[in-house]
Image (spheres, rainbow, N blue to C red):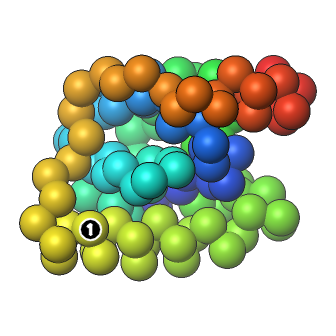
Amino acid sequence: MTHVVTSNCVDCKFTDCVLVCPVDCFYELDRQLVIDPDECIDCSACVAECPVEAIFAEDEVPEEHEGDIALNASEAERVKGDGQDPITDHKDPLPTAEDRKSELGF
């Protein structure tokens, strides 16, 4: 099993999660992060670190975010194929992050 970054991450891109990941399975898109399901070891360390509750175990992804399971897999594969390395260092969130966080109720 793997963990999945859901669309709650869109327009936020908080990177607290990447700092605790022991296997460096997070990849960066323009507006969010994704997890490579082939690299994730299902340790759950990242879940509590996300300030917008965007990360779920694959079998616990809320119904409205089920499409994000395939998105994580395909986008991780795409960016890796483009030669992108995993994100392993903290970066500032997107300028829209605090507004998005409030919009989500956090």
Residue found 51% across the figure and 49% down from its top: 32
The residue carrying mark 1 is: 79
Numbered marks: total? 1
Percent x, y of residue 90: 32, 22
Percent x, y of residue 75: 40, 71
Percent x, y of residue 91: 35, 24
From this view, report whether residue 72 is shown above or below residue 11: below
Farthest residue in the front direction? Answer: 95
- Residue toward you, 62 or 15: 15
Give the residue type that dot 1 points to. Answer: Val
- Asked whether residue 106 appears in the rendered view, the answer is yes
Residue found 83% across the figure and 64% down from its top: 64
Residue found 71% across the figure and 70% down from its top: 66
Q: As drawn, is 45 to the left or to the right of 64?
A: left
- Asked whether residue 40 appears in the rendered view, the answer is no
**Quarter of the rendering containing residue 29:** bottom left
Q: Quadrant of the C terminus?
A: top right
- Residue toward you, 78 or 63: 78
**Quarter of the rendering containing residue 43:** top left
